């Protein structure tokens, strides 16, 4: 008993100097609306938890990682195979970032749908948008630190986009690469951004974000038909707190805690099961047999860049990101008051569903990239036997030309081959032999002209093979005038 | 007057700084001024250091050797590497920059940057179909580098070259982009 009494006195002595109990009362113990203790309100703390995981695992990785172009790759391999539990820390860092981006997007959607950006929480939303941008910045710079072929060519893609900026393009490219070309200086600056600049910014903005949650209060669970009115909102909110507010700890935190535990276990499980990501291939620019692809957070961008019409590309590339960012920042001012409940905001709900559907479809397309030629199809793909059975020698030779001249890298036959151009099953019913010859020789916007690259005999062979590509039940296309004769 | 009282007075009475405490007001102004000047002395070098790479004029491009011309057979296109002329010891493998060398007949060459003109991915040469194809978004180029199909807005970037004492040299060292081709 005396012992406990003494400990108590020590604690009180410390508290008298550090005011810990006051800090506690103003933070963890602050009053929140009872309605905010909801499963919908767990994503913010979930994101913060992921960020903490990133800090811890990031510091651990920095103990081994070498931020130089010459040694980064080797140090990653060392982490994967030599350093005790290095693979696991790398995997945790990778999955921590995946979870962080995903949960942050859920948080964004939730606060948007619940009207949390409205008066008086405009700055909470704006600081959140800055945090979103910082997190995406972390995702991109982190991908570069995994200094492999994808990172090297990813930088090239970033530079190619920046290089399209009028007038300032070259200067921006130099600034981004730390010189005229991708080299050691490039990795050093991405390391500095990823380890010092952006995390520092995130810590500062997170403090502001949390401070705003304390000063302006957490958004109450929206009730349909109870719009935000500027004149009365704060009074009503505070009255509500007095009437049925609960202390955040221990009353409202329980669901956050459960969710946080699940998130942590999710990260650990994924890290242990799937392992670390890469590195994929030595960052030797001379190894050109590579098809660079971004991580999943940027797959949609990869898809968008591939599918945009050529003539709009530069304009869209340089304006759309800024328009999106400006719109995000403007959200609380576009709709500052009024209904908060998603039940009364159909446009908001549809926008969120629409945006997520679009991003998901682009990401889905990005995973198998139908716009990319399959660079090794001409050596690795086999034709189904029935495409060759009973064919004349010329037709069979055409099949050989179809492979050896890399036609199959872009066109599929019998389900094998590239998806860049149209599949050629049934092409004989769409084009006559003359049209096929013209198409092969002259090409078109999306197909190179093979006139100079194929001998007349090869053209004849490949066209005769094309003419066999139709179902037995369907007649090949014939020129109308010839048909009448 | 005790210091504390003075302090409270300074904080609470509007205008007191200027009227009643000229020395304190002077010190405050001096303090701002000194820190402002010092800030310039600190800030200018830091910003100058940070933004030094914003400069795009400089000796970035130099003539670099690709090897003897005899190593490039006529009427063939082959992959070659040159060493980045601005390399630093810690650049590792990123020092070796690849390019496509097309030798027509005699001493006529075309040397293409590896980077696709669409978004900079490495284009691959296909000897059989005489095409360069890009693995990223399907751009294709003819053997003379001109645009064949797909999204690229122009033909392949071409390096300047010269031949000296049987050696092939190109002017390299800069990542080609649309606004600063080679």
Image (tube, helix red, strand yellow):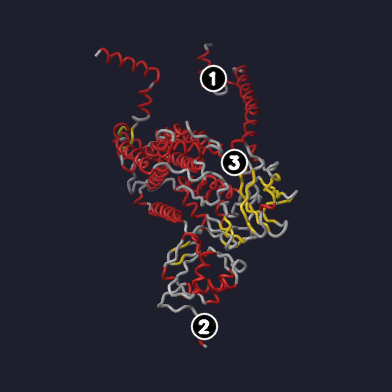
Look at the numbered discs 3 and 2 and tell me whether their residues touch, using CB distance below 8 Å.
Answer: no
Distance between the alpha carbons at the discs numbered 3 and 2: 61 Å
Residue B157 lies in quadrant: bottom right
**Sequence-first disc among 3 and 2:** 3
Circle 2 — which element? helix
Distance between the alpha carbons at the discs numbered 3 and 1: 57 Å
Q: Tell me the tag on residue A183.
A: 3
Taking depth in this image into account, of A364 and A231 the one nearest to the observer is A364
Q: Position of residue B101 (x, y in %)?
A: 65, 54
Q: Position of residue A374 (x, y in %)?
A: 49, 58
Q: Which residue is mark 2?
A: A480
Residue A331 shows in this picture: yes
Do tags 3 and 1 sit on the same chain?
no
Q: Which residue is mark 1?
A: B10
The label nearer to you, 3 versus 2, is 3
Circle 1 — which element? helix
- From this viewpoint, which residue is outermost toward the left? A1
> What crowding class fits label 2: few (fewer than 14 Cα within 10 Å), some (14-19), or many (20 or more)?
few
| Chain letter for mark 1 | B
**Side of A170 relative to A125 (left or right):** right
> Does residue A19 lie above or below A468 as drawn?
above
Q: Position of residue A313 (x, y in %)?
A: 56, 56
The label nearer to you, 3 versus 1, is 3
Q: Position of residue A258 (x, y in %)?
A: 30, 38
Residue A60 lies in quadrant: top left
Circle 3 — which element? loop
Distance between the alpha carbons at the discs numbered 1 and 2: 99 Å
> What crowding class fits label 3: few (fewer than 14 Cα within 10 Å), some (14-19), or many (20 or more)?
many
Q: Residue at x 44, y 45 (%)?
A: A336
């Amino acid at each position: 008993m005396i012992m406990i009494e003494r400990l108590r006195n020590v604690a009180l002595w410390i508290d008298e100097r550090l005011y810990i109990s006051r800090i506690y009362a103003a933070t963890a113990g602050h009053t929140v609306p009872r309605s905010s203790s909801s499963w919908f309100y767990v994503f913010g703390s979930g994101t913060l938890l992921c960020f903490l995981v990133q800090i811890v695992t990031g510091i651990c990785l920095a103990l081994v990682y070498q931020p130089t172009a010459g040694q980064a790759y080797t140090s990653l391999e060392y982490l994967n195979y030599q350093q005790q539990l290095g693979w696991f820390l790398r995997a945790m860092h990778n999955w921590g970032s995946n979870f962080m981006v995903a949960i942050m997007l859920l948080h964004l959607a939730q606060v948007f749908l619940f009207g949390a950006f409205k008066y008086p929480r405009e700055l909470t939303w704006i600081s959140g948008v800055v945090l979103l941008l910082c997190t995406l910045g972390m995702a991109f710079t982190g991908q570069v630190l995994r200094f492999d072929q994808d990172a090297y060519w990813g930088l090239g893609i970033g530079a190619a986009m920046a290089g399209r900026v009028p007038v300032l393009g070259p200067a921006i490219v130099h600034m981004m690469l730390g010189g005229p070309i991708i080299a050691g200086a490039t990795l050093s600056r991405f390391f500095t951004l990823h380890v010092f600049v952006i995390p520092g910014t995130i810590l500062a903005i997170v403090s502001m974000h949390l401070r705003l949650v304390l000063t302006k209060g957490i958004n109450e669970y929206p009730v349909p038909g109870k719009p935000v009115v500027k004149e009365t909102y704060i009074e009503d909110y505070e009255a509500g707190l007095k009437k049925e507010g609960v202390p955040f700890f221990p009353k409202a935190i329980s669901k956050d805690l459960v969710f946080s535990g699940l998130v942590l276990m999710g990260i650990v499980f994924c890290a242990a099961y799937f392992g670390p990501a890469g590195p994929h291939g030595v960052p030797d620019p001379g190894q050109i047999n590579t098809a660079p692809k971004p991580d999943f957070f940027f797959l949609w961008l990869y898809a968008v860049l591939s599918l945009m019409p050529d003539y709009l590309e530069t304009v869209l590339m340089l304006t759309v990101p800024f328009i999106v960012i400006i719109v995000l920042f403007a959200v609380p001012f576009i709709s500052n008051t009024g209904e908060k409940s998603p039940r009364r905001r159909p446009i908001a709900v549809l926008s969120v569903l629409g945006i997520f559907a679009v991003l998901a479809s682009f990401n889905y397309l990005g995973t198998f990239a139908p716009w990319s030629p399959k660079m090794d199809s001409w050596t690795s793909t086999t034709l189904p036997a029935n495409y060759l059975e009973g064919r004349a020698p010329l037709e069979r030779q055409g099949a050989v030309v179809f492979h050896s001249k890399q036609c199959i890298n872009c066109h599929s036959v019998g389900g094998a081959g590239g998806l860049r151009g149209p599949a050629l099953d049934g092409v004989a019913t769409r084009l006559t032999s003359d049209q096929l010859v013209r198409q092969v020789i002259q090409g078109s916007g999306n197909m190179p002209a093979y006139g100079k690259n194929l001998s007349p005999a090869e053209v004849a062979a490949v066209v005769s093979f094309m003419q066999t590509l139709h179902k037995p039940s369907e007649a090949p296309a014939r020129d109308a005038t010839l048909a009448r004769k | 007057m005790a210091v504390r009282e003075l302090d409270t007075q300074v904080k609470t009475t509007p205008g007191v700084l200027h009227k009643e405490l000229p020395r304190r007001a002077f010190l405050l102004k001096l303090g701002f001024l000194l820190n402002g000047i010092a800030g310039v002395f600190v800030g200018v070098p830091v910003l100058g250091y940070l933004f030094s790479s914003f400069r795009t004029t400089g000796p970035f491009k130099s003539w670099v050797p690709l090897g003897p011309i005899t190593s490039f057979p006529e009427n063939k296109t082959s992959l070659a590497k040159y060493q980045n002329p601005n390399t630093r010891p810690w650049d590792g493998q990123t020092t070796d920059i690849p390019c496509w060398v097309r030798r027509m007949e005699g001493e006529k060459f075309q040397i293409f940057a590896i980077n696709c003109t669409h978004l900079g991915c490495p284009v691959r040469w296909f000897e059989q179909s005489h095409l360069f194809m890009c693995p990223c978004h399907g751009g294709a180029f003819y053997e003379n580098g001109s645009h064949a199909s797909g999204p690229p807005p122009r033909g392949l970037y071409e390096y300047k070259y010269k031949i000296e004492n049987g050696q092939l040299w190109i002017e390299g060292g800069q990542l080609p982009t649309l606004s600063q081709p080679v």
